[in-house]
Amino acid sequence: MELLELMKTRRSIRKYLPQRVEKEKLLKIQEAGLFAPNPGGRQGTKIIIVDDPELIDRIGVVNANCENRNWDIGVSSDQPSIIDDKSIKSGFYSAPALGIICVDRKRKHAVNNIGAAFVCAQNMVLEAFDMGVSSCIVGRAEATFSFPEMQAILDEWGLDPEYMPMVFVCLGYINGDYPKIKARNDGRALFISKED
Ligand SMILES: Cc1cc2nc3c(=O)[nH]c(=O)nc-3n(C[C@H](O)[C@H](O)[C@H](O)COP(=O)(O)O)c2cc1C
């Protein structure tokens, strides 16, 4: 698909089939994240791919419980989020695979570090979509891993203790119809040009 068309048709998907994503595709999605622009050319992020649905659900329940779910606005009617549907237990929506983008703890609040994590996530969702894999970016990563039993999982994986999760990318095959493109709000685009 042409790149702009891909960007316009990608949606955040929260209904997944249990079908696992092929390892080759997961590795390509990880690689796409590794090639994201990065502040100062430091390549300062680490990207973990978890291909273990049970473990993802376990972490996802903690993730959902880190959110105040009483927002006064809805997120999506066709792909309900944990805000829209309080019966959803996992913040990762039973996705069978998960990307976790990690940043250096010492710089965790630096805007560029946060930005670095999210551009990796964006590269990953676009590469995933291009291969027919659906995705949803999910936050609350720092809160999710703030509990000792959650930190123990990172230790078990061998993540450098200097690093901490900043953002998640749920990955899997969509269950049901793909949602339509959402119209863009008016007034968001300015174009400044010097008259000839
Ligand atoms: C920084 C960021 C954080 C997000 N966090 C969550 C989240 O925690 N849970 C969730 O279900 N969706 C999350 N999303 C997905 C947004 O809800 C989604 O992109 C938005 O509703 C627009 O829908 P679309 O992606 O289908 O166009 C996040 C998106 C971004 C960019």
Image (tube, grey):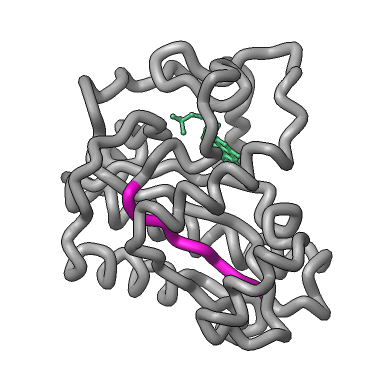
Q: Position of residue 71 (x, y in %)?
A: 74, 18
Q: Position of residue 119 (x, y in %)?
A: 53, 60
Residue ID at (27%, 72%) = 27
Above or below, 142 against 91 in this view is: below
Residue ID at (30%, 35%) = 16
- Does residue 85 appear anywhere in the picture? yes
Above or below, 112 against 135 in this view is: below
Q: Position of residue 18 (x, y in %)?
A: 24, 41
Displayed quadrant of residue 83: top right
Quadrant showing the N terminus? top left
Residue ID at (68%, 79%) = 163
Displayed quadrant of residue 97: bottom left
Q: Position of residue 75 (x, y in %)?
A: 57, 20
For ligand 1, give the image quadrant: top right
Q: Which residues are drawn in magenta?
A: 96-103
Quadrant showing the C terminus? top right
Residue ID at (53%, 54%) = 168
Above or below, 88 against 128 in this view is: above
Magenta span: chief secondary structure: strand
